[in-house]
Amino acid sequence: MNEAGFIGDDGWYSSARRLPSPNFEVRPGSIEPTLIVVHNISLPPDDFGGSAITELFQNRLDHDAHPYYDQLRGMRVSSHFVIRRDGVVEQYVSCNERAWHAGLSSFFGRERCNDFSVGIELEGSDTSPFEDAQYASLDDVVRATMRRYPIDAFAGHSDIAPGRKTDPGPHFEWSRLQHGCELPLQYFPYLANARTA
Ligand SMILES: [Zn+2]
């Protein structure tokens, strides 16, 4: 488990393991992030605990090591954070910078979500529940991010890239995040829309 920390002027979280990725760029217009995008990732899918996520984000994955990795050839991706199954938080890109986690995406018509979001990957999959330690660390990361940046909304990757992405998947409990961080429902516009639909 991590100590709850803070995000410094440099955009790095004090309680994270720093594993810098070269896959980032300046946020256009130096805008501040206002959206948090929640994802899940595991490589290969449903296989937890290995080093492949780190290798992918650092462009050093051995694409011949598993058949699934073949389709990842040439991909340049990253996320600000990865939260491991035991709650350990890893950071790959400063939150001041634009990480490459969302891809082709739209938040209620506002495209290029990477421009204005912070990406948090939970090590997991669409087929298994997340760990209590991950929800606890997620709360810490979210609280630290919200103290630093004017975050006013949360979305799942599947919300902003429907039809293309399914993560964080049916096992991610949005209500745990909402209540853990004591946030009103308006921070979760997709959830709010689903309730009133
Ligand atoms: Zn995703």
Image (spheres, helix red, strand yellow):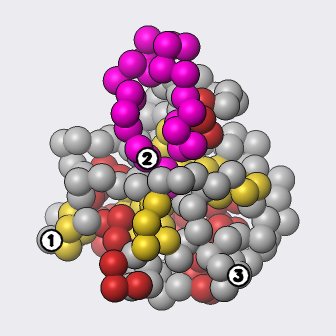
In three-dimensional space, the C-alpha distance between marks 2 and 3, rounded to whole angstroms, equals: 24 Å
Disc on the earlier residue, 2 or 1: 2
Image coords of residue 185 (percent x, y): 41, 76
Query: Is residue 72 magenta-colored?
Result: yes
Q: Is the shortest distance between ligand 1 and the CB of mark 1 under 8 Å?
A: no
Instruction: Give the quadrant of residue 193.
Output: bottom left
In three-dimensional space, the C-alpha distance between marks 3 and 1, rounded to whole angstroms, equals: 31 Å
Quickly name the residue at label 3: 8
The image shows residue 85, relative to residue 158, as above or below, that is above
Instruction: Give the camera-side residue of 71 and 5.
Output: 71
**Residue 68 visible to the viewer:** yes
Q: Are marks 2 and 3 in contact (CB under 8 Å)?
A: no
Residue at point 32% right, 41% down? 166
Pointer 1: residues within 10 angstroms few (<14), some, or many (20+)? few
Disc on the earlier residue, 3 or 1: 3
Image coords of residue 54 (percent x, y): 62, 40
Pointer 2: residues within 10 angstroms few (<14), some, or many (20+)? some
Query: Is residue 161 magenta-colored?
Result: no
Pointer 3: residues within 10 angstroms few (<14), some, or many (20+)? some
Instruction: Give the quadrant of residue 92.
Output: bottom right
The dot on residue 109 is 1
Between disc 2 and disc 1, the foreground one is: 2
User: Which amino acid type corresponds to the residue marked 3 in the rendered image?
Assistant: Gly
Residue at point 76% right, 55% down? 17
Image coords of residue 28 (percent x, y): 33, 78
User: What secondary structure is marked by label 1?
Assistant: loop
User: Which amino acid type corresponds to the residue marked 2 in the rendered image?
Assistant: Val
On the picture, is 71 further left or further right than 162? right
In three-dimensional space, the C-alpha distance between marks 2 and 1, rounded to whole angstroms, equals: 23 Å
Residue at point 43% right, 73% down? 26
